[in-house]
Image: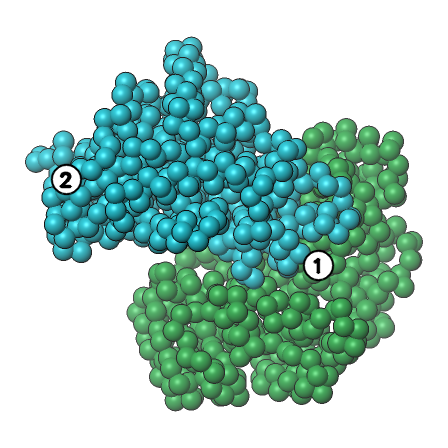
Chain colours: A green, B cyan
Amino acid sequence: MLRPSVKIRIKEIFGDRFDDSPGALAVYSYDASRRAVQPDAVVFPVTTAETSALARLSDQYNFPLVPRGAGSGMAAGATPVRGGVVVSFEKFDAIRSIDRANMIAVVEPGVVTERIRREAAKVGLFYPPDPASSAFCTIGGNAATAAGGLRAVKYGVTADYVLGLEAVLSDGRIIKTGGKTIKRSVGYDLTKLFIGSEGTLGLITSLTLKLVPLPEKRATVLAEFIDVEAAARACAKILSLNERPAAIELIDSSALDALHRAGKAPAGLRPGLAAILLIEEDGSAAGVDMRAARLVELLRESGAVKVESAGEGEASEKLWAARKAISAALYKIRPDKLNEDVTVPIAAVSELMAGAKKIADSAGIECAMFGHAGDGNVHINFMYDKSIPSETVRAQKAVGAIFELAVALGGVISGEHGIGAVKAPYLGVEMDRSTIEALRAVKRAFDPKNLLNPGKIFPVTQKVGE
Amino acid sequence: MSEKSADGFGAGGSGACVSCGSCRSVCPAYRAARDELACARGKMKLIEMIDNGLADQNADDVALANCLLCGGCSSVCPVNLDPTSIFVARRAQKLDNKISAPLTRGLASAVDSQKKLRLWARASAGVSDFFGRNSADDSTTRESDDRAGVERFAALPKIAGRFFLDNFSGELPGANPDGGRTVYFVGCLNNFFQVSAAESVLRILQSRSREVYIPQTQVCCGLPALTVGDLDRAASAVEKNIAGIFDGGAPDRVVTSCSSCAAMIKDYTTRLVSGAEKNERAARLAEIVIDFPGYLALSDKSARKRTANSAGSKEIRVTIHDGCHSTYSLGQGRDLRKTISETSGVKLVEMDEPGACCGFGGSFHIRQPQLADLLLQKKLASIRETGADYIVTPCPGCALMLNSGDRKSLRKIPAISLAELFDLLKG
């Protein structure tokens, strides 16, 4: 509960960008994880100074701060757990500069990721990370969750493109991490520390991003398979070539079925497919043409029943739009899902998928798999109906088993969504006590009172002040 | 409370929202306000909470009133929900709460009466003349909401001395015996203000049809009534129009000069009428209605009518502003682009995000002038980047909005219809 006198102090900072009306509290209670707890108030900072003033108040009056971008996260990272103030960065969304000579962009945290890509392209530059939610997610959220996306196999993840950032700490102090240079060896890498910190170490108020030259050409290759193993093997073969495609996405039959039910499936797919591979090539025109042709041949030899290649244009756009619609379309199968993004070393993808199928079968729960086969990050979704208690229990057991499997294969329990509140109970599946204690030590150093996004990352046995 | 059932509008479907946030990528209200309540997800979730007794019945009034009903959310939703229709149904449920502005409710009540529509047109023109005179020399930037709204009125073209339907109605001969029977639904802005543009459309319709029929009794398409949730009034307008359109024989095509009219007729006709005979006509109408760019592309199969540029003049650069209804209901402007690319003397330069909303939204720009202006300025910035000479748009409402924004800038880029573009090319 936020005392009225404290609300007045907050209102003094934010004016009409403070909202504690019932409607606002209702809609800032949830994110894409569908967990919901109402905050006591919502604020919309548009400057670092405001954010800092808010943090000082939070420190003085001991209320939690819950930072938020688009609220598109899957792990309940942006939902409050015990009230407090939701700090929405939606209006803090200017692209401050794009520096062509140094290939750098400086952006505010609320900028939608796709907008960065579009603006950079206008000046011949490229921001490669491409989360599936890129049309509406924010760069601040991407940094806070160490987001990945479709192009990680060739280009890496968000962490590889944040050269520096500005953040407000729990007591209102403002720090600047990193810089503009490609190389930097100046003490601890605080930039990397903040990437994936999910708002628990500070509030990000500005980011300096690395850009790369815009590729001359892009092409898309679509391969249809009636055998999922063949698709996984084809993927492994592609990864052994001397040049990597920009994206290799695998979509299984359940995910395809969901797309069909939602009316979003790519046109012309033959019925009864076990899987499709959707691949993007980019680079010089000559290189793209050569590699696309080589891929088509490789895919046919690997047992694809149909392979098509397309240049940039509407047909291609539709394919990638379909891929990006899968996560939500899955709800056409069952009303609820447990949505995991475990990641394993690329050579273990086949085993992960086979193991996931076994786990799903023995739990009696339907499982849809799709995702970044090229970088080992396969999204494994257990579809169920939470109004049926036995299904809920079995689905949760299956999730636990998936985490164990991923770790046993040398992988991690989350590749790009982050831990949030949803996976906090499972942190110990992957990390030993000493490592978790090291993380807690960092948290204590930055936020001794546990006011910055409490209830995230760490299992909730942690108490305030621990 | 509207007597017309809102059942056809997906009322009660709000609980199916999966919270993904995809709607934020297209929502113009969100783009302007950047607040969860402004996007479809926020409204869907709020409605769900209200229905579950977790929030007050009126908690969604403001957010609901600020939706442009553009259809973007319904078109991108990955689970195929139709929030647009749900919001219409919701507004219908709240009709008695009067959540819409008085001006828009007043206009809504006029949609099924030619007499009332004429009064409204004359009143708007009077306001426009008044403000137009007063702001003519004002070169300062907009400082208040009032000025922004004023800009829109001031940009209304002069009201016609004689309205289009006073000059043209009934059966008119066509020049193409294989061209079928075309009904021309002219729409309010063309009828009262943009008569010469409507005449240009008519000339082309006549050249490509066997006959053209202009129903004398046509009224507004009903969209202003639909948007405030007055489904009865919208249905009344629709029924009058159906009677007029089918009078004298079954048409092969119903062509509108406004993409919003076409979308309204196509998407909502069958949901607003009842009774077997009316339903059959309604279904047929929804099938055959098309906007002018769509009609051109359709009727272009045999004769490729290329409009030659006047000798000696240089190529005209145009950019296309699609408008929401064209983007989400009528095929994303493919037909318009096809026609322009096949027209000599014209070079198409695409703007960034041609489908992005201009901010007009029917009555949105009156209710929310600041937000509307934000959208307009973003749109104008995209347009200026293209270096185009003209903006071509299939929606007269968008044209009005775009022309109002550029009234004071040094470089005017006029927004015109496709038919007006052809007139220009003829020189």
- Residue at x-position 23% and y-position 35%: B170
Could you tell me residue A235's position as x and y percent? 49, 81
Q: Quadrant of the C terminus of chain B?
A: top left
Where disc 1 sits, the SS reads: loop
- Residue at x-position 39% and y-position 65%: A316
The residue singled out by tag 2 in the image is B173
Which residue is at the front of the view, A154 or B99?
B99
Mark 1: which amino acid? Answer: Arg
Tell me the CA gap for discs 2 and 1: 61 Å
Which residue is at the front of the view, A205 or A365?
A365
Which residue is at the front of the view, B390 or B152?
B152
Seen in the picture, residue B350 relative to B224 is either above or below; the reply is below
Seen in the picture, residue A332 relative to B183 is either above or below; the reply is below
The residue singled out by tag 1 in the image is A34
**Quadrant location of residue A332?**
bottom right
> In the figure, is residue A6 to the left or right of B100?
right
Is there any visible trace of residue A92 in the rendered image?
Answer: no
> In the figure, is residue B351 to the left or right of B298?
right
Question: Disc 2, disc 1: CB below 8 Å?
Answer: no
Crowding near the residue tagged with mark 2, few <14, some 14–19, many ≥20 C-alpha atoms within 10 Å: some
- Residue at x-position 56% and y-position 39%: B229
Crowding near the residue tagged with mark 1, few <14, some 14–19, many ≥20 C-alpha atoms within 10 Å: some
- Residue at x-position 39% and y-position 89%: A301
Where disc 2 sits, the SS reads: strand
Mark 2: which amino acid? Answer: Pro
Could you tell me residue B187's position as x and y percent? 35, 34
- Callout 1: residue from which chain? A
Is there any visible trace of residue B2 in the rendered image?
Answer: yes
Seen in the picture, residue A335 relative to A198 is either above or below; the reply is below
- Callout 2: residue from which chain? B
